[in-house]
DNA sequence: GCCGTTTTCGGCCCGACTGTTTTCAGTCG
């Protein structure tokens, strides 16, 4: 049966290769492209001064489409209906069809006749919103940041109604630092700045407690800024001044009684909000977000005749909840929703129905199935890695070196791998309480074959397959490559499935749902690689694996004995993907794990 | 432009800070 399947995949794959070679190339339209059209429409409508709710509808659609896990164009091309998506009505659905079909949108073209596309770029400049951009364009014909710089330098901006000298110089300053302003920091990097700053804030006299809220608390893979929330005694004095005097502060953007924003020398923006203890829970909820989640919860409050803001939950003037987050949720009839779930991706409905998952925690992990040693591109020996893993509370690990194709990493050939198998057998006899499994991170070649022969792979406990080359292949080609890899006889886990590197490399293009379903069929697993610049699977794909019943392995991909700390970031991402401990492969005991890895079962 | 625990029309989340203003608009989160 396996052979027949492989042949099918093989045939399909070759057809795909031929069609690629014969040059029938059409510009692919991805969900991101459709979302980008709607985002530009929203920007231009806003500059035009259109109905704010119409604009919001486009912005909501951007989010919905970006997070929709299936490729819309592929879906529509296959003849399937566009499923009913929240916030997408008849009109927007029509435009989605239009964009998927033609790559363009009449409304956008029409807007371009009123405003050049470039003006939307001006909205990214801090201090410039739609009204000012419109004024700049209509009064001074400012279209680009270059036009803007010139107008500011010439002193023409200060003359405009509603503008002034300060606004003009602020624009000039913003233009100088613009390259940094939209930068998002990987969570692990932000963590380094956050922890020492938080300790500093906690030590300011008058501060009774301080926490980090925002996307940091929701464990997003990157954060745009840090939101620190500090409860202060009612007579506290000088807290803001102390905060702004922090050693690493480069620039103070705003500073009032309740709120201050600063830029650190690293470029990271930090907002501090002060709150009184009775409002701490309300403020934590409010500033943890996400925005979409907050709006949804506020709507529920409204439906109960209540008003929710960062100070509490109110019935008319009376505060009825707010000291803890739990009190807020309870008062609107919901159980506490974990921060990682607060994205308005169904968590409120699940909470209502009592279907919230009990999310996996770091303590649940019993093993780590992906790491390297100094034999290839790691820094420590097998024994050192095993000891560090044991110290981190793990019961088993798998050593998974690169394969020969990855020469830069000194990947193993069959002979080297066989020698390591012997080494591990020897070391295993000396390590009570820790088991080392024998594995490999074998390259998935461009044709979907693996970089080492079955005869060698058969000797291992697990085979992790990974893409390290040919990132550019077409969606169809890439999908078939991965399908073929998963169907290899000894394949166990698909490592860092999308290959993305946060901030530097886009994910490869493939049909994730097809791969997830194939993994299910073949009793394979998907990895959530916990390296801070990977965090791959992404959250929504964890959710997809969960929905399809495929277990996810949360692995450190450690290249050093100090890298087991990565696992906390993997856990954060897994929690964002709704995963419970039972849905994570390496929460299993070794005895439970082994049968799952045994390929003879397939 | 979407949507319905009161609704197919009339709503649509809420407040702080700044600068340019003399009471508020614009921006931001």
Image (spheres, coloured by chain):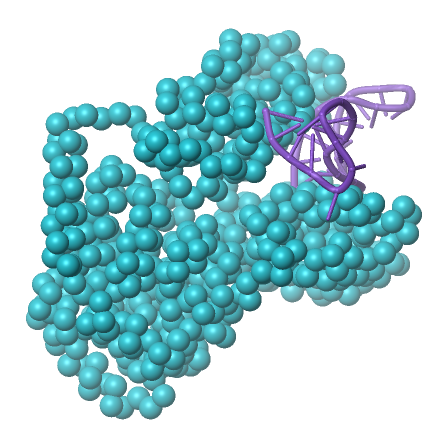
Chain colours: A cyan, B purple
Placement of the N terminus of chain A among the 4 image quadrants? bottom left
Front residue (pair A437, A210): A437
Front residue (pair A144, A30): A30
Mark yes or no: residue A111 visible: yes
Mark yes or no: residue A535 visible: no
* Residue at x 35%, y 78% (from the top left corner): A592
Q: Quadrant of residue A332?
A: bottom right
* Residue at x 64%, y 43% (from the top left corner): A291
* Residue at x 16%, y 26% (from the top left corner): A23
> Where's residue A139, x and y in %?
64, 9
Front residue (pair A544, A47): A544
* Residue at x 47%, y 14% (from the top left corner): A106
> Where's residue A63, x and y in %?
53, 37
Placement of the C terminus of chain A among the 4 image quadrants? bottom left
Q: Is A223 on the left or on the right of A316, as rendered?
A: left
**Total number of numbered labels?**
0
Q: Is A306 on the left or on the right of A368, as rendered?
A: right
In the image, residue A296 above or below residue A332? above
Q: Is A82 on the left or on the right of A259, as rendered?
A: left
> Where's residue A406, x and y in %?
18, 56
């Amino acid at each position: 049966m396996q052979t027949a399947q492989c042949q099918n995949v093989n045939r399909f794959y070759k057809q795909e290769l031929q069609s690629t070679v014969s040059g029938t190339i059409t510009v692919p339209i991805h969900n991101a492209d459709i979302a980008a059209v709607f985002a530009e429409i929203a920007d231009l409508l806003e500059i035009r001064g259109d109905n704010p709710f119409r604009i919001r509808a486009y912005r909501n659609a951007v989010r919905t489409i970006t997070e929709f896990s299936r490729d819309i164009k592929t879906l529509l091309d296959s003849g399937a209906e566009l499923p009913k998506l929240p916030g997408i009505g008849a009109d927007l659905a029509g435009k989605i069809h239009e964009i998927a079909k033609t790559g363009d949108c009449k409304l956008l073209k029409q807007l371009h006749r009123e405003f050049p596309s470039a003006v939307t770029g001006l909205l990214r400049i801090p201090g410039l919103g739609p009204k000012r951009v419109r004024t700049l364009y209509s009064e001074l014909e400012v279209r680009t940041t270059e036009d803007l710089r010139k107008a500011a330098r010439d002193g023409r901006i200060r003359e405009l109604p509603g503008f002034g000298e300060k606004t003009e110089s602020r624009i000039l300053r913003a233009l100088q630092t613009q390259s940094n302003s939209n930068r998002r920091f990987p969570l692990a990097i932000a963590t380094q700045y956050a922890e020492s700053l938080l300790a500093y804030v906690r030590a300011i006299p008058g501060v009774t407690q301080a926490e980090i809220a925002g996307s940091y608390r929701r464990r997003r893979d990157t954060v745009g800024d840090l939101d620190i929330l500090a409860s202060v005694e009612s007579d506290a004095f000088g807290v803001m001044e102390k905060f702004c005097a922090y050693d690493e502060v480069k620039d103070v953007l705003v500073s009032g009684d309740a709120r201050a924003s600063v830029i650190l020398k690293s470029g990271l923006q930090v907002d501090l909000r002060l709150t009184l203890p009775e409002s701490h829970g309300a403020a934590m909820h409010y500033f943890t977000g996400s925005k979409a989640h907050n709006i949804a919860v506020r709507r529920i409050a409204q439906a109960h005749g209540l008003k929710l803001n960062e100070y509490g939950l109110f019935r008319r003037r009376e505060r009825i909840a707010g000291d803890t987050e739990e009190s807020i949720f309870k008062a609107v009839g919901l159980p506490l929703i974990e921060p990682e779930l607060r994205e308005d991706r169904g968590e409120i409905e699940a909470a209502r129905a009592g279907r919230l998952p009990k999310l996996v925690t770091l303590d649940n992990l019993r093993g780590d199935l992906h790491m390297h040693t100094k034999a290839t591109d790691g820094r420590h020996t097998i024994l050192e890695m095993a000891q560090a893993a044991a110290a981190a509370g793990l019961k088993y690990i798998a050593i998974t070196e690169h394969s020969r194709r990855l020469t830069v990493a000194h990947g193993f050939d069959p002979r080297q791998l066989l020698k390591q198998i012997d080494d591990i057998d020897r070391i295993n006899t000396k390590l009570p309480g820790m088991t080392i499994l024998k594995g490999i991170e074998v390259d998935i070649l461009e044709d979907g074959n693996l970089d080492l022969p079955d005869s060698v792979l058969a000797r291992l406990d697990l085979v992790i397959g990974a893409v390290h080359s040919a990132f550019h292949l077409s969606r169809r080609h890439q999908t078939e490559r991965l399908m073929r890899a998963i169907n290899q006889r000894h394949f166990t886990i698909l490592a860092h499935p999308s290959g993305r590197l946060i901030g530097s490399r886009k994910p490869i293009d493939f049909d994730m749902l097809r791969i997830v379903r194939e993994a299910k069929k073949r009793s394979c697993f998907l990895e959530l690689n916990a390296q801070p610049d990977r965090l791959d699977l992404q959250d929504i794909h964890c959710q997809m694996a969960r929905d399809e019943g495929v277990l996810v392995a949360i692995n450190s991909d450690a290249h050093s004995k100090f890298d087991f700390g990565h696992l906390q970031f993997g856990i954060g991402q897994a929690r964002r993907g709704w995963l419970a401990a039972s849905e994570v492969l390496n929460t299993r005991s070794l005895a439970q794990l082994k049968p799952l890895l045994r390929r003879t079962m397939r």
